[in-house]
Amino acid sequence: MSMAKIPFLLILAWLSPLLTHAQAVTNAPAYKNLPTDGYFRTCYENDFFAATDRYYTQGVDFEFVHPEFRKLITNKLFINPHFNYTRYGIGIQHNGYTPSSLGHDDIIYGDRPFAGVFMIKTFQLAIDTVYRQRFNTAIHGGVIGPAAGAGEMQAYIHHGLNNIEPRGWSNQVQNDLVLNYSIGYEKELLAYKRYFSISAAGQVNAGTLNCGAGFGSTIMVGYFFSPYSNDKATRKDFQVYFYEYPEIYIPGYDATLQGGMFNRTSPYVILETDMTRPVRRNRWGFVVSYQNIYLEYFATTLSKEFATGTNHAWGGVELSIGF
């Protein structure tokens, strides 16, 4: 695939009415760069950090990147831009979504439906150190619905915290197949040594969980390894920086709101005519990294996704250990 085609793909993604976006944990963006050949990463998101308990209520993600994963047969399904440095990884992900109130057995019409998602993923991240660009592809496979176990997980956590018993999970989006493919591209626009970087980014998602596209810009300020280089951290190196990533995207289909594509028996979903387009999101974070240990705190705000919804916010923490 020639680099001349990538901007064209991003334009198509931006214009397509069949595309959308979901609150899935992703570690491909430049602001999450870890300067090692391999790493283990865990991320936890929860709207508890924003003092709420609704909508996108929890996300858990585990990733493992290792050079040996270049041998995975699924890599043949990825678009290869033939950049000069590539990482390969696998992971698992679990997301939970609820309405604004957890104390009702009955459906709360006009609110978000209950939904749980469990996925296994494989991904590829390519870095071009000459033209300062990054290209990532990922495949997610799994299930949405009771089989994801989101209701049981939330009940267990709330019981341990002596919090309100979550009710209404019997009305959640029903079991269906999750199979998604995503493509992302980032291009550095301006940088100053290790202190400042600004880049443009685009993302395309297509599949049974969500189909969509968004465009944003990453700003990084502090002291950090360039995410567009192949520099490796040593035992004496550290990073400390702040980033912000504002994004706009056009929703098309989201199974966590509208139900699965194949199983249409969910007791309650958001109608297509009630989906909000476009949607605005902003994420900011603070990162401290010493040697090959990376620690991040982040917060996200999201404009309403459906007509009778409201704006939402959540936060999270992330720990990575490189090797």
Image: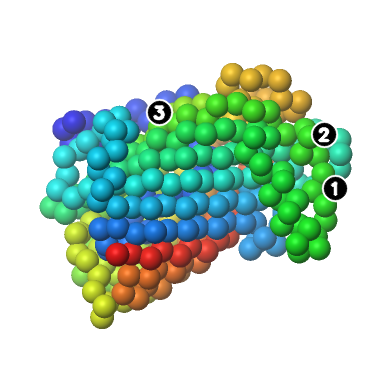
Considering only vertical position in the picture, is 116 above or below 191?
A: above
Res 107 label? 2
In front: 135, or 68?
68
In this rendering, the label closer to the viewer, 2 or 3: 2
Dot 1: within a 10 Å radius of its alpha carbon, few (fewer than 14), some, or many (20 or more) residues?
A: few
Residue 184 in sight here = no
Among the two numbered marks 3 and 1 on one chain, the one whose residue lies closer to the N terminus: 3
Please report the residue visible at 70 percent of the width from the left and 62 percent of the height from the top: 51
Among the two numbered marks 2 and 3 on one chain, the one whose residue lies closer to the N terminus: 3
Res 159 label? none
Q: How far is disc 2 from disc 1 in space, using C-alphas?
A: 11 Å
Please identify the quadrant where the N terminus is shown: top left
Please report the residue visible at 71 percent of the width from the left and 50 percent of the height from the top: 154
Q: What is the secondary structure assignment of the residue under circle 3? A: helix
In this rendering, the label closer to the viewer, 3 or 1: 1
Res 103 label? 1
In front: 65, or 20?
65
From the top left corner, tell me how far across and down residue 196 is, in percent: 29, 67
Please report the residue visible at 19 percent of the width from the left and 59 percent of the height from the top: 230
Dot 3: within a 10 Å radius of its alpha carbon, few (fewer than 14), some, or many (20 or more) residues?
A: few
Residue 232 in sight here = yes
Q: How far is disc 2 from disc 3 in space, using C-alphas?
A: 35 Å
| 116 lies left or right of 8 | right
From the top left corner, tell me how far across and down residue 279 is, in percent: 54, 41
Please identify the quadrant where the C terminus is shown: bottom left
In front: 186, or 290?
290
Dot 2: within a 10 Å radius of its alpha carbon, few (fewer than 14), some, or many (20 or more) residues?
A: some
Q: Label 3, on which residue?
A: 15
Q: Amino acid at mark 1?
A: Gly
Q: Count the marks: how many?
A: 3
Q: Amino acid at mark 2?
A: Ile
